Image: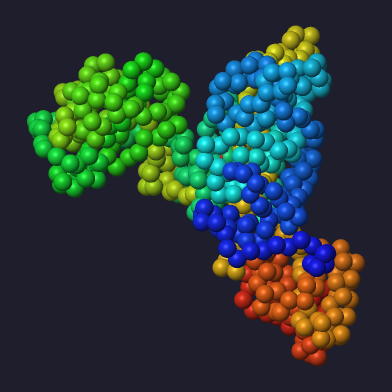
């Protein structure tokens, strides 16, 4: 490709809402342009990279035996009613209406459509196992689209769905997909980790996420120093404390904390460690309010709390007015001691082994000191409702947990019969008996991978593409070509030769001065840069630099070709 014929539109300034490196760099390089919130055009440059990712994903999925198909983006409401997800999927589902007033959604995922396909196509166990996949645009009306294509509303996903007669067969395909994902992310040159995951709105049993490790990641992942345990913090279990609750030694005492509401304020004011305080959160329960208590230095885990039988499947804080009406107290002063009997008190396991703790006094401007469970404060139930923290013992008993940040680029699930049962997808087994299909689903955020790779691979000058994702492998930069026929000819000759050898090469024939030319080339992150200059030619060499290195190498033509081979 000659750069003079390409549409490269790099820019210096990016909007202030581009908070993370990948978003800034994708805008500065012109890879993407925003049309509306969370909706982007992929420029010719951006699409070159996106297509490379797509290519690797497709090749590995094919190699794994999955069959590519293409399903519609627009899906009828009736199908989603059959699984109950028309309502349950919530605000992320973009609903649309046609001229006949019929409802549709723009597909955020395709379990319904593929299961509908399967119930019509699959009749006999002889057709199983089978794994269908597509690479297709999805739409999710995310509450907070941000970070460019990292959390977009419209994005490109590879989604695969497998069907099986037995759970064992499903488990073995799950393993196959797990291994395939490992190959895909390894081939793309990403540093990643597979972690145990919550199954979320998709549902099902076993699930792993593939997380690209990056400080800007939205997910926190916990992994053990002493085993291969790794899980999203959303679902990482806290290990039950080894100790049991000591007997009370102090008596309950109300202390004035006129303006101290947060654990930090209260613990500093009363000179008590946060570990000796109980933090109480009042949330909306199935009927009325529910109090959740964790130790002062711990945080409530939303995913675990949402699964409590007392909660409606989601964690929502109660309104201040509701709390005041039920307790007569404003939120910062609520505690489990003396809370009305109508409010169940669910206590985290680590909070439940405290004695003589500090907690809200259920009266504005006061806390209790010396509070004790059972004696002063009711426990309705003890449960694991906190986030694990660094240094916690690993739940498998080996080592301690560390926390890292990650970007979820892939997710594999064993769904079991959840969708097949709802939609009536079954086959006849070898005894002629009808069996509901077992199903797995496997997603990859193809467009998100591009941003995730940049998060891991950039410097002050721009992107440093892992080779398999680079828009071009190599670039030729002639210096002063307009004034120097030999430079021009040698650059052209090398360009032809590299192309003949099948190397995807760019010739920067825009006639820019070296400064602006190199700035663009570094920004867009091409792995191999070859400078053709009068001085180099006089010495019989090309100036070679690998993106990310700080030194040039003077290489002969042969040495250069060998390096690029
Ligand atoms: P997240 O927790 O990040 O919202 P998810 O669990 O909703 O992801 P899945 O339903 O498993 O995601 O979708 C499969 C893959 O699609 C994800 O692993 C992720 O890489 C990608 N993906 C999901 N939502 C988005 C989005 N809004 N923008 C870009 N990629 C996304
Ligand atoms: Mg999501």
The total of numbered circles placed on residues is 0
Left or right, 452 with reference to 240: right
- Is residue 227 or residue 277 the one in the foreground? 277
Q: Tell me residue 348's x, y (percent).
A: 32, 30
Q: Tell me residue 202's x, y (percent).
A: 59, 28
32 in relation to 229, above or below:
below
Q: Residue furthest front?
A: 99
- Is residue 224 or residue 424 the one in the foreground? 424
Kindly tell me whether residue 247 is visible in this rendering. no
Where on the picture, by quarter, is residue 124?
Answer: top right
Kindly tell me whether residue 218 is visible in this rendering. yes
Asked which colour scheme the image uses, the reply is rainbow
18 in relation to 336, above or below:
below
Where on the picture, by quarter, is residue 25?
Answer: bottom right
Quarter of the image for the N terminus: give it: bottom right
Q: Tell me residue 413's x, y (percent).
A: 62, 31
Residue found 63% across the figure and 26% down from its top: 95
Where on the picture, by quarter, is residue 178?
Answer: top right
Residue found 69% across the figure and 18% down from its top: 101
Q: Tell me residue 205's x, y (percent).
A: 57, 26
421 in relation to 324, above or below:
above
Left or right, 255 with reference to 386: left
Left or right, 285 with reference to 34: left
Quarter of the image for the C terminus: give it: bottom right
Residue found 77% across the figure and 30% down from its top: 71
Residue found 73% across the figure and 38% down from its top: 136
């Amino acid at each position: 490709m000659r750069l003079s014929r390409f549409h490269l539109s790099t820019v210096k300034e990016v909007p202030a809402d581009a908070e993370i490196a990948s978003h800034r760099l994708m805008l500065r390089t012109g890879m993407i342009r925003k049309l509306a919130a969370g909706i982007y055009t992929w420029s010719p440059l951006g699409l070159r990279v996106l297509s490379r990712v797509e290519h690797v994903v497709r090749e590995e999925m094919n190699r794994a035996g999955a069959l590519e198909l293409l399903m519609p983006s627009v899906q009828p409401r009736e199908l989603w009613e059959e699984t109950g997800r028309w309502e349950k999927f919530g605000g992320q589902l973009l609903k649309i209406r046609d001229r006949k007033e019929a409802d549709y959604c723009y597909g955020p995922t395709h379990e319904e459509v593929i299961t509908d396909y399967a119930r019509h196509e699959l009749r006999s166990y002889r057709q199983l196992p089978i794994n269908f996949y597509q690479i297709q645009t999805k739409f999710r009306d995310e509450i907070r689209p941000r970070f460019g294509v990292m959390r977009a509303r419209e994005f490109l996903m590879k989604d695969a769905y497998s069907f099986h007669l037995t759970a064992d067969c499903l488990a073995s395909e799950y393993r196959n997909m797990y291994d395939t994902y490992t190959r895909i992310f390894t081939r793309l040159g990403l540093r990643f980790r597979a972690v145990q995951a919550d199954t979320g709105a998709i549902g099902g049993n076993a699930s792993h996420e593939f997380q690209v490790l990056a400080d800007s990641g939205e997910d926190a992942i916990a992994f053990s120093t002493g085993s291969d345990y790794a899980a999203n913090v959303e679902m990482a279990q806290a290990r039950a404390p080894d100790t049991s609750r000591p007997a009370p030694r102090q008596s309950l005492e109300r202390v004035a904390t006129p303006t101290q509401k947060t654990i930090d304020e209260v613990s500093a004011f009363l000179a008590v460690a946060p570990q000796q305080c109980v933090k109480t959160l009042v949330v909306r329960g199935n009927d009325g309010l529910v109090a959740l208590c964790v130790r002062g230095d711990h945080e409530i885990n939303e995913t675990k709390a949402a699964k409590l039988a007392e909660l409606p499947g989601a964690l929502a804080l109660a309104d201040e007015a509701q709390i005041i009406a039920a307790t007569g107290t404003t939120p910062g002063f609520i505690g489990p001691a003396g809370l009305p009997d109508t409010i169940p008190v669910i206590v985290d396991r680590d909070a439940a082994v405290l004695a003589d703790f500090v907690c809200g006094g259920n009266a504005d401007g006061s806390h209790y000191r010396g509070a004790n469970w059972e004696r002063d404060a009711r426990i309705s139930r003890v449960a694991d409702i906190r986030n694990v923290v660094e240094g916690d013992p690993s739940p498998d008993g080996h080592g301690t947990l560390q926390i890292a940040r990650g970007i979820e680029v892939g997710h594999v699930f064993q769904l079991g019969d959840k969708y097949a049962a709802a939609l009536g997808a079954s086959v006849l087994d070898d005894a002629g008996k009808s069996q509901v299909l077992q199903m797995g689903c496997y997603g990859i955020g193809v467009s998100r991978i591009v941003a995730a790779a940049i998060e891991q691979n950039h410097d002050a000058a721009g992107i440093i593409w892992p080779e398999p994702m680079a828009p071009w492998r190599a670039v030729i930069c002639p210096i002063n070509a307009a004034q120097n026929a030999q430079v021009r000819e040698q650059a052209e000759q090398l360009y032809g030769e590299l192309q003949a050898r099948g190397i995807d090469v760019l010739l920067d024939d825009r006639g820019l001065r070296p400064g602006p030319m190199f700035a663009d080339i570094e920004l867009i992150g091409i792995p191999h840069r070859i400078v053709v200059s009068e001085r180099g030619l006089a010495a019989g060499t090309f100036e070679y630099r690998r993106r990310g290195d700080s030194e040039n190498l003077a290489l002969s033509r042969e040495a250069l070709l060998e390096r690029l081979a």
